[in-house]
């Protein structure tokens, strides 16, 4: 089969070539769009990442396509109905980087709780080693961590928290009672979790039901001293509500590796030149507001990006494609 990869890094080519012997592999660093769809016009399989928007119009340009494989857990960048109408199955990487993302979430937590970002900024601005009261942080020991979503990543978050002698409260539509008993924490509804937590961290999948899970109607339930962490999906959070809560001091700070509308943020230069169509300029502007807030630590969707995490993604990607080629498809949506 001919397999065309988009949004691929140079270091990923050799492992994929080794994992997919007997296939014709083509690699491109750019995302797949209608404008460059000719690069994959005779491909049997396309493998993409989250920035490639697979629309009906794009699929019409790929007449030989037999499988869409995304190297991500989320799939909101794929028009599943359009793919289904054309008889094209879609596969994902349903879980990866469970330790990688959990560790990164705690990196954000510690950066905020110990005001590391603010301290570095002061040092770089010539403040030297004169320590103002504004840089005083707090210990995690004894604090309550609210974990929204207790899948593999959420479970690792809880294990780390317990190692730091934190209290844990969790929310999940499918609670794991056995794990809760083993780790000595309790499940609660979302309002209760928001009210009781010193730190709230999101690890739940994104779908229509979880859109704006954190919003203007519930973010105010959080403590004024609380920190908010999101390494899951940007659209789980109503951006406007988060900004207002931060501006009013309703919460103390936020650590964000994902943003609502982050694909458009990456295409900002193209947008400014009129080379792309975009409607939600309000969210785009709000993302810039978040970048400039002193109590926000923002990173560019890198929580998954370790050597170990990426290799796991490539292994599952190869498993998806080899399974499909061999008549035993796996991880289908």
Image: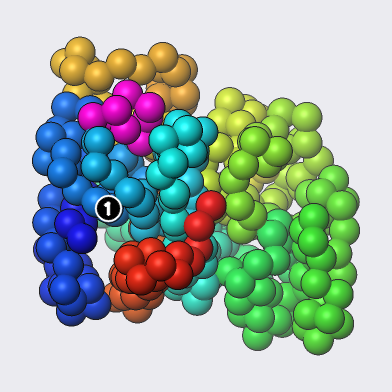
Q: Residue at x 81, y 49 (%)?
A: 190
Q: Quadrant of residue 120 in the image?
A: bottom left
Say above or below: 146 vs 230.
Answer: below
Question: Which residue reaches farthest front?
Answer: 327
Residue found 32% across the figure and 32% down from its top: 59
Mark 1, other Cα within 10 Å: few <14 / some 14–19 / many ≥20: many
Percent of width and height locating residue 132? 48, 56
Residue with the mark numbered 1: 45
For the image, the number of numbered tags is 1
Colour scheme = rainbow
Q: Relative to residue 89, is residue 129 depicted above or below?
A: below
Q: Quadrant of residue 32?
A: top left
Who is closer to the viewer here, 202 or 68? 68
**Is residue 144 covered in magenta?**
no
Could one spot residue 138 in this view of the protein? yes
Magenta range is 54-61
The residue at 13%/50% (across/down) is 28
> Considering the numbered disc 1 on the image, is that residue within a helix, a strand or a loop?
strand
Counting from the top left corner in percent of width and height, residue 114 is at: 52, 64
Side of 52 relative to 34 (left or right) = right
Quadrant where the N terminus is found in the figure: bottom left
**Residue 78 percent across, percent down from the top left:** 43, 39
Residue 234 point in image, percent of width and height:
51, 41
Does residue 300 appear in the picture of this structure?
A: no
Please give left or right for residue 41 compared with residue 186 in the image: left
Quarter where residue 177 is shown: bottom right
Magenta-span inclusion, residue 55: yes
């Amino acid at each position: 089969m001919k397999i065309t990869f988009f949004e691929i890094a140079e270091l990923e080519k050799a492992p994929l070539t080794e994992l997919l012997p007997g296939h014709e592999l083509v690699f491109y660093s750019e995302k797949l769009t209608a404008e460059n769809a000719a690069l994959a016009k005779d491909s049997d399989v396309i493998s993409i990442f989250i920035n490639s928007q697979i629309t009906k119009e794009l699929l019409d340009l790929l007449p030989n396509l037999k499988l869409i494989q995304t190297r991500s857990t989320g799939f909101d960048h794929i028009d599943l109905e359009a793919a289904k109408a054309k008889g094209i199955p879609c596969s994902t990487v349903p879980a990866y980087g469970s330790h990688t993302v959990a560790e990164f979430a705690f990196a954000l937590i510690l950066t905020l709780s110990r005001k590391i970002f603010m301290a570095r900024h002061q040092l770089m601005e010539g403040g030297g080693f004169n320590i103002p009261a504004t840089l005083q942080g707090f210990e995690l020991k004894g604090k309550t961590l609210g974990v929204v979503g207790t899948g593999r990543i959420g479970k690792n978050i809880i294990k780390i928290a317990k190692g730091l002698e934190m209290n844990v409260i969790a929310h999940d539509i499918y609670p794991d009672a056995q794990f809760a008993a083993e780790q000595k924490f309790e499940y609660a509804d979302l309002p209760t979790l928001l009210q009781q937590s010193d730190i709230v961290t999101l690890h739940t999948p994104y779908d229509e039901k979880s859109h704006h899970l954190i919003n203007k109607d519930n973010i105010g339930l959080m403590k004024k001293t609380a920190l908010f962490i999101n390494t899951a999906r940007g659209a789980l959070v109503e951006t406007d509500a988060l900004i207002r809560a931060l501006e009013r001091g309703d919460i103390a700070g936020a650590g964000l590796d994902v943003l609502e509308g982050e694909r458009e943020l990456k295409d900002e230069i193209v947008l400014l030149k009129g080379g792309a169509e975009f409607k939600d300029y309000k969210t785009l502007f709000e993302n810039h507001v978040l970048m400039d807030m002193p109590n926000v630590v923002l990173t560019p969707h890198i929580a998954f990006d370790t050597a170990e995490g990426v290799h796991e993604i490539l292994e599952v990607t190869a498993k998806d494609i080899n399974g499909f080629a061999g008549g035993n498809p796996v991880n289908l949506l």
